[in-house]
Image (cartoon, rainbow, N blue to C red):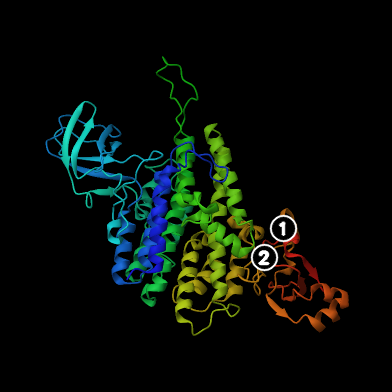
Amino acid sequence: MTSYYSLAVASLLAAAASVGARSLAAEKLLGYKFEHNMDDHARIDLDQLAIETALGTKTSTSFDNALTIYESGGHSKSYARLQLQSPLPTRVKKGSDVKGKTAGGLTIHAKAYEEAEEGDQVIEVQYPTDEGALPCFVGALNLVDQEDTSGCFGPTGQIHIGGIKLEYDYDIEEENVNGRSIAGFSLGAKKKMYDTKSCAGCPYPEYSAFVDYYGNYEYADDWIRSALTGKATPFQGTGNADFTKFGFIGKAEAAKKGMAYMAVWMYVVRELRDAIDDCNVECDLECAADDPTCTQCNDEPVKAWDEGVAFYSGSLAQQADHGDGYLLLSLANKRGLNFGTHTDGMSWVNTEIFELFHKGAKHLADRDCRKAEKRADRIIALMQVPLIQGTLRYSHKLSEYGSVEQDDAEMIEKHNGEGATFAAAVLPMLNKCSSKDADTVYKHMKVGKLRSDYPAVQKAFENNYDCLGITCEDIGGVLNDESKYFLERAGPCGSGQAFKRYGASPKGAGGDKQFSVGASIGIAVGAFIGFVLVAVGVKKATGGRTGKEDIKEVHTEPVESYSAKDTGEMSII
């Protein structure tokens, strides 16, 4: 039986398939103008969506299908393996123009995916990603009935390469494959982020931190694969997780969040660091046509930077006020809503990150590599914020202050899977600052830890915000999803100076315990104040920090973001 969930996701995928009509190169995304067409890169989020669709059915077969889509892809870097009926009469260079037709007779302007030698009888041809190009989304998507062959080469036909005409046939379902997958981000990480022969800036510091902590180069793949197959992770270092303790619910949360927030997260970092490497290559901004000693600068730095922005955002980020999506932009907005760190639904993290994306691209175009690197450093620091917020959110839900009932086994497993994965995605960075505090977070957030000590987790992070390059202001506090008050002992840390930008003070961060309006208000502030506030209640705050005074406050309106204007806070003496 087809579920409402499956129908809804299928509808979203169908809508997303038309995203080629809205090119990332043709419009700005949160003020960022792509210099290159990044539609194909951004569509990696559609693989994430297809995987989450499969996981939603919670069967062994659906988990196997999710694993195959994770490994093989379906939406990004699509190409066909065409079986030629006669050998190639000449060598074909990578990128050479190849023209053919769809089954419906529409012309496809494609290119050679890899170099093909004279005499070869198979040629790999990459589909176009230009604005308006019809999609060929196959890969492993046939496992979940979500393939789209409208833009694929017909099963038989003729291709044109230069003046050469070649007859071919092939299996549309089996020989339309993908050169980019989420698994590839982790499996190729060592070469692209660690080996000094592969990149000038290698090993990149963020990736090194993860390798040092987990003891594995393919740590993200290890986490994801172990979650999908229900096994323990094979880490040689710290941070192992035993997924035999989970059912489908916990395993699904760990797998899908591991893909987006461990594998994709690190690959965004890779693209930003790669852009700096490309920038630092010695070259000349202008070359005379007759000067063989001059090396003309290219736009590879900006292209790599564009790719980082595309992987951060995904293709669905263009739609629905950037609220939909499955990658990092959408996560930051969700956590901004949960922590009061947003303006009209746009997280402060995203606002600053996209300002930095814009400035970094300009620095790279100007070959100001030092300034671009500073922008990259701050972006990467800010990218940790939603991961920390996620860890804190689910730690609180599983703590004595949370709302989850102890006998709600499914919800506890779900939150444990979520919290453990958010923690896993940031623990190596925390470990660089303090192995002791990283151990504390791991101890209280690991897979199978069904109750968390929120104050301990909170303090372990707060001890290291300076080292991590972030602030109390960046993180905010855990809000009650309904009342929008900060939850008990879960408000923002720091001093009034830290919140100067937003005119806020953390003193009201203590609790979400409401107590009666009548006598309490009358005694505290008199009948007049009681009359004014009778409809809104009084909130008692416990301070939530060692050495902080307990403060009782009145909230005249919910906390949408923790500025004085929004909270309407008022101290009761």
Q: Which of marks 2 and 1 is nearer the N terminus?
A: 2
Task: Indicate whether 353 appears above or below 448.
Answer: above
Residue found at the very far left of the displayed protein? 86
Crowd class of label 1 (few under 14; some 14 to 19; many from 20; radius 10 Å): many
* Residue situated in front as seen by the camera: 427 or 10: 10
Label 1 is placed on what type of residue?
Answer: Phe
Task: Indicate whether 185 appears above or below 244.
Answer: above
Label 2 is placed on what type of residue?
Answer: Pro
Mark drawn on residue 499:
1
| Left or right of 419 in this view: 77 | left
> x, y percentage for residue 526?
88, 77
Are the residues tagged 2 and 1 within 8 Å (C-beta)? Answer: yes
| Left or right of 490 in this view: 289 | left
* Residue situated in front as seen by the camera: 557 or 389: 557
Q: Can residue 449 be seen in this view?
A: no
Return the residue at label 2. Answer: 492
> x, y percentage for residue 362?
56, 36
Quarter of image, res 556:
bottom right
Quarter of image, res 571:
bottom right
Q: Is residue 458 visible?
A: yes
